[in-house]
Image (spheres, rainbow, N blue to C red):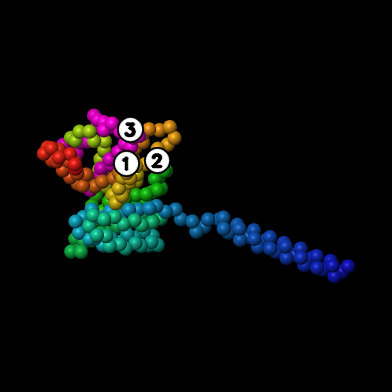
């Protein structure tokens, strides 16, 4: 009987130890001490030359170094916080050298770091089951003193940090088609452009139209 009691006590002790160890470890897992909220940042080099970009957090814990060719975008994942960015061309010309802050914003999970602070233009495109070609009729875009008819777009004035408010970024294209919600016959998507690029597209479209070529 004594032997059985000792075996039972040993088994009970092991069970309690296991439970205690499991709880302790479980508590550590859920404390979230190592959790750090991050954002996806597209670093936009709108310059006509390659730039070397250094981004360093003010507390010195994070540092990112990138080499980005002209007109290209490089995405990095960064913790929210205060930073300093410096972008230098291959000829040692400084594009930007200043502080910025990534702040958590409801329903915003990405940002563009607009190194040249060029204006952006966001264009909206309507997808329809039976498109009429008149979806943008009467809408206009005015930029740099000129108005463009039948264009559904708006301007984001140039700044360093731009919270994401579009579906497709500078380096992404519109899809040929999208899946509509049940019962819907139309939906829209938006795409971001550098202002210089978008205005060039509009000017070329007008030029082709003037010469009777609608293929552009």
Magenta highlight range:
118-146
Q: Which mark is nearer the camera, 1 or 2?
A: 2
* Marker disc for residue 210: none
Q: Is residue 181 above or below residue 174?
A: above
* Marker disc for residue 190: 1
Report the Cα–Cα distance between label 3 and label 1.
20 Å
Q: Is residue 15 left or right of residue 181?
A: right
Report the Cα–Cα distance between label 1 and label 2.
15 Å
* Marker disc for residue 130: 3
- Which residue corresponds to the image point at 41% horizontal and 43% vertical from the top-left? 107
Tell me the element at label 3: loop
Residue 136 showing in the rendered view: no
Q: Are marks 3 and 1 in contact (CB under 8 Å)?
A: no
Q: Quadrant of residue 176?
A: top left
Please check the rendered image and state whether residue 139 is part of the magenta-colored stretch, yes or no.
yes
Q: Is residue 29 left or right of residue 75?
A: right
Q: Which residue is mark 2?
A: 179
Percent x, y of residue 19: 68, 60
Counting every numbered tag in the picture gives 3
- Which residue corresponds to the image point at 82% horizontal and 68% vertical from the top-left? 6
On the rendered image, what quadrant is the C terminus found in? Answer: top left
Q: Quadrant of residue 54?
A: bottom left
Q: Residue furthest left?
A: 211
Percent x, y of residue 170: 28, 49
Residue 134 showing in the rendered view: yes
- Which residue corresponds to the image point at 72% horizontal and 62% vertical from the top-left? 16
Q: Is residue 75 above or below residue 131?
A: below
């Amino acid at each position: 009987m004594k032997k059985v009691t000792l075996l039972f006590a040993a088994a009970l002790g092991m069970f309690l130890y296991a439970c205690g160890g499991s709880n302790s470890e479980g508590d550590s897992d859920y404390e979230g001490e190592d959790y750090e909220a991050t954002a996806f940042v597209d670093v936009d080099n709108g310059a006509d030359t390659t730039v070397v970009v250094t981004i360093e957090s003010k507390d010195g814990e994070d540092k990112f170094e990138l080499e980005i060719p002209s007109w290209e975008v490089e995405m990095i994942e960064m913790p929210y916080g205060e930073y300093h960015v410096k972008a230098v061309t291959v000829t040692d010309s400084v594009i930007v050298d200043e502080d910025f802050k990534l702040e958590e914003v409801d329903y915003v999970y990405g940002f563009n770091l607009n190194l040249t602070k060029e204006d952006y233009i966001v264009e909206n495109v309507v997808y329809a089951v039976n498109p009429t070609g008149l979806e943008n009729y009467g809408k206009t875009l005015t930029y740099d003193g000129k108005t463009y008819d039948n264009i559904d777009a708006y301007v984001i004035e140039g700044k360093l940090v731009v919270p994401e408010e579009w579906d497709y970024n500078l380096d992404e294209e519109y899809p040929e088609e999208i899946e509509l919600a049940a019962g819907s016959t139309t939906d829209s998507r938006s795409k971001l452009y550098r202002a210089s690029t978008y205005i060039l597209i509009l000017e070329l479209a007008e030029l082709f139209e003037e010469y009777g070529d609608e293929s552009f």
